[in-house]
Amino acid sequence: MRTQAAVSNSYETFWNRLNRQAQDLFVENKTHSIVECLHYHNNSDEESVTDATIKSKRQTCLYTSFSDINTLNLALNASGHARSISAPKRTHLFFISQTTSWSRLRITPDMFNRLVQFCNVLEEFSTYVLRFGRKVRDSPETSIASHLRLHTSGGLFVGYEICYNIKHFELHGRELKDPWSCRHAAFYQRYSFSQQSSTWIIIQGPSKIKSFIEQSVPAQASDLSTLHEHPLYMHIQIIRMLERNWTSYLITLEEQRRKTNEKILFLGPCQPSVDLQDVHNIHNIQAKLRTAITIIEGTASVINTVVNLCNILQDHENQISPPAFSSLVNVELKQLLSTFQCHMRTASKILQFSEDDKVMILTIIAHRHDDAIREHAGSLDSFTARASVQSERRTEIASKALLESSILRIATLITVFYLPFNLTAALFNTNLIIFQENGSLKNIGLWVECEAKKRLQKIDRRQIQRDIENC
């Protein structure tokens, strides 16, 4: 068992770690603070019934809440409440909540300080508390862990402390595309063998945990001892509550995956309607599945810690409960472990299917990209071929124009050098080429040979006529 000095040093270490971030962890105004407490115990009165002595158990359950340090101090320090704390077979549960997952804990620093001091919480619990508080964006993914400490005195096992954090999924009820929210909860229990009493601190537990415990406690009232009296059975109830939504959550992810899978399930003559958005959707589903697998692995680790503690308690089960209860609790824990292993296999299978879908979608997109490249390359080849044909035609036209230009130059030279001057002047003094006033061409005549023949004929007739007259 820890000495008083060790306990004091542990408390100072615990509070110093939290005090550095108290501004983001806890609310400052007591009007926003609320700490709920549920405590119950068994009263045993002996009655004689048909010469047989049995114990009739009357269970009482009391629910209270505190909004400031004064009311909390009165509750913890009052003589009647102090005697209740020390009474045997009592269970006290303190509930601390958040308004939202990104808000501060609804407890003031001095109230939390007083509660931690009263419960004598082990310092490792501060690691889980620091994961709550005000945030402006998603915090980095943190693993699920657990801490266990055994208390001994004179070589005897007198109690234990256990704390852990668990993530789970709940429907948030808002009109969003994703109906699920990932919740973070932390649990602490301290148990004493001598008093057979438990003290719990539950931070942001499941939404219906208080009503569930209130309903289950009266159901325990019986003339016989029940499994609920075992100090570890509350862990089974809590983990079972956290497990209840896992099947629905994995079904939601599988339905989202199938919506994308249906686009590539059949490859017909038409192109599958998949694009980069489908790759993004599959990527998001895979990220959620990997987170789910990490949470399941962490939860299984917590269950194994509780199983190890249960195995230790089996050596002292006469001190904590009637015989065979530890074995029954062990069976329940192993059944829970088997359930989470089943969820693990389901999540892993969906992850593998989603990876296959992603590969298929990327293959289709790559094939479509290759087809587009081939089609584009074919269009370029066709355009190049047409451009080549047109270039050849332009070259042919230019060659013919050059030939005609050469012939025209030769004809012009012959006309200038070999025909009489007056004939040449008369030939070119025609309306074959007419210019407008602005200098642009108005008419181009190409009938040089015909006009030349006509003028030559006229000249010949005139010459003949003059010769006749001279004679």
Image (cartoon, rainbow, N blue to C red):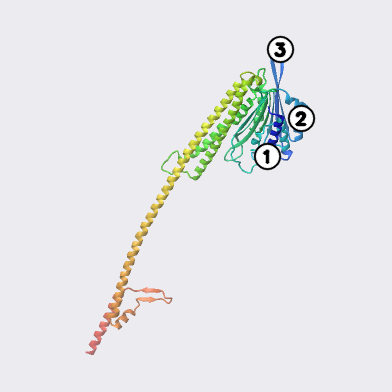
Q: Which amino acid, by three-letter code, is at mark 2?
A: Asn
Which residue is found at the position 32% from the left and 71% from the top?
405
Query: What distance separates the C-alpha of mark 1 from that of mark 3?
Result: 55 Å
Which residue is found at the position 40% from the left and 50% from the top?
375
Q: Quadrant of the C terminus?
A: bottom left
Q: Where does the image place residue 453, in percent across and percent down from the top left?
A: 27, 77
Query: What distance separates the C-alpha of mark 3 from that of mark 2?
Result: 38 Å
Q: Quadrant of residue 24?
A: top right
Secondary structure of residue under mark 3: strand
Q: Where does the image place residue 8, in percent across and percent down from the top left?
A: 71, 33
Q: Quadrant of the N terminus?
A: top right
Q: Where does the image place residue 82, in percent across and percent down from the top left?
A: 75, 27
**Quick one: 423 or 212, which is closer to the camera?**
212
Can the viewer see residue 207 in this picture? Answer: no
Residue tagged by mark 2? Answer: 77
Which badge, 3 or 2, comes first in the chain's sequence? 3
460 left or right of 140? Answer: left
Q: Give the farthest residue toward the top.
A: 51
Residue tagged by mark 3? Answer: 48
Query: What distance separates the C-alpha of mark 1 from that of mark 2?
Result: 26 Å
